Amino acid sequence: MIQFEHIAIGYSDVLLRSAFIELEAGKVYALIGRNGIGKSTLLQSLTGIVPLKEGTIRLLNDSLESLSRLELVKRIAVVESRFEGLEYLKVKDYIALGRTPHTDAFGNLKQQDLAVIHEIAGALGILALMDKFTDQISDGERQLCAVARAFVQETPMIILDEPTAFLDYLNRKKLLTILVELARDQQKCILLSTHDLELCIQEKVPMLLASSGKLSLHEQLTLDEVLNEMSKY
Amino acid sequence: MKDRSLRLIIICLLGLLPIAMYVHLMSGQIELSYSSYWKAIFDFNNKDTYQVLIREFRIPRMMMALVAGAGLSLAGMLMQTLFKNPLAGPYVLGINSGASLLIAVSMMTGIQLFQSNFGLIGTALIGAMGAGFLMMFVAQRLKSQISLLLVGLMFGSFTAALVSMIESKAGAESLKSFTMWSMGSLQQVTFEQLPIILTLFILSIASVFLLVKPLNVLVLGEKSASMLGIHIQRTRFLILGITALLAGLITAFCGPIAFVGMAIPNLTRMLFRTSNHAALIWGNVLIGGLFLLGIDSIIQLLEGQLSIPLNAFTSLIGAPFVVFLLMRKIK
């Protein structure tokens, strides 16, 4: 699905380097690393905001630089770290914004768009929230809405920036389980940055570990191994 | 709120519009017959004082109340969405101040940017546009919503200082006409100027409708909008351009009118309870137009006993409304 080919990322200085890494469809990957190590910068490089210093990232065989903005947003959906809800913005309208790359110049929703929204909302179990305002639901519910917005964008790859921050333990677990299931069922590649080490280990989520200037992929690690790696910072 | 009930509100507001226009025309001090109105428009005789009164005063004033109310509200809505700030507006952000400054320069120093008949619009437009881009530049470097409003306030004070320096050097005649202009008035427009004003106004509204999609996505912020494929630079430029056109046009002809552009978009959102800009554009145009028609009707009715400058009246209502919004929204 997506390949990191000997990349170096950072602003003026290189923060992280990687050898060849490939992330597959149908899986959730957790981007783990200490604060300030370059996780956010990596996510921004994936969305074309921060250009790569070296190497290439290929998404479905095309390098990211070769894609136009519209082609890129049809391949990668991004959920930013915290959506606090907006007054007078309904859940269904919020989720529908995920269809933006697919709608006409006026943003009109067609039957097909509504069907996709309905299907995803059903899969995430938030159909009952659709007519509520986004500032009047709980943090956990709002996070599910943000995930729904990313899924209705119908991109092969989804990036979530710390989706589990601000959630209680049960909601974290629920969100991660849902993401693992959806990634498998819909054959998507999901990359999320998180500090929930135990949860990721428990759910056997493969880890993209950022430590001492290097990015490495690990199918399974114990908590001790992760902590050991991270303390090399 | 369901789409159907939104449509119903819009139809009701549309129905109120001719009534408000009628009330405005009838609330002048001198009573005039319907036939004079008819003749003034379709069979004008410039010897008939009543017809001149209608054609040169009543109709332009009524149309300008509508245009100014609707235009400022729409400009305010655009600013609030672009800056993601419910307290933004052309007045608060200094868009009006930019226009005022250049108008003061051109009215009182004799330095004219344009020579033509519509020089004042051009001047106000450049001032409004300049202030708009300055605010955009500053906004990108500020973290908090309140800071932006404070910067707008500072910019307002700064331009006001420059204006008073110009005033101290100005001749009596030009000083008087600038002072009259700065009180805000809907009576400066002639019947002949109406077609061009209305054309620009309608073109601006039509272009805002073309921006419905980016506006709806912009409520999530520029970063998220960009990741949904919205061309941010282009959208920002178009929004600021239309805002400057509306605010500049209205400021040039009516003087500064405070708070309408900030208050009405909030009122519209509260009434419509939606973030869909297709409905909000209708709402702002209609509610803004109705509001200023109403306010100016009251001013006309009171004219015998008390003459209130328009800008003072809108501030009298607008300032407490800002305090109300501050207490409600920003915790």
Image (spheres, helix red, strand yellow):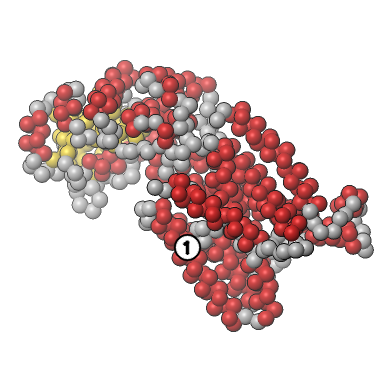
Kind of residue indicated by mark 1: Leu
Residue at left offset 22%, top offset 41%: A39
- Does residue B134 appear in the picture of this structure? no
Q: Count of labels shown?
A: 1
Compared to A54, does A1 lie above or below? above
Q: Residue B70's spot in the image, x, y percent? A: 64, 49
Residue at left offset 89%, top offset 59%: B50
Q: Residue B191's spot in the image, x, y percent? A: 79, 58
Q: Nearer the viewer, residue A14 or B285?
A: B285
Compared to B267, does B305 lie above or below? below
Q: Which residue does the numbered mark 1 point to in the structure image?
A: B153
- Does residue B272 appear in the picture of this structure? yes
Kindly identify which chain the residue marked by label 1 belongs to: B
Identify the element where label 1 is drawn.
helix
State the residue lying farthest toward the front. Answer: B305
- Is disc 1 surrounded by few (<14), some (14 to 19) or many (20+) residues within 10 Å? some
Q: Residue A85's spot in the image, x, y percent? A: 40, 37
Q: Residue B229's spot in the image, x, y percent? A: 43, 38
Compared to B143, does B165 lie above or below? below
Residue at left offset 91%, top offset 50%: B35
Residue at left offset 53%, top offset 70%: B160
Q: State the quadrant of the N terminus of chain A.
A: top left
Q: Quick check: B117 left or right of A140? A: right
Q: State the quadrant of the C terminus of chain A.
A: top left
Q: Quick check: B30 left or right of B18? A: right
State the residue lying farthest toward the top. Answer: A185
Residue A227: name its quadrant.
top left
Compared to A204, does A4 lie above or below? below
Q: Nearer the viewer, residue B269 or B222?
A: B269
Q: Quick check: A51 left or right of B3? A: left
Residue A69: name its quadrant.
top left
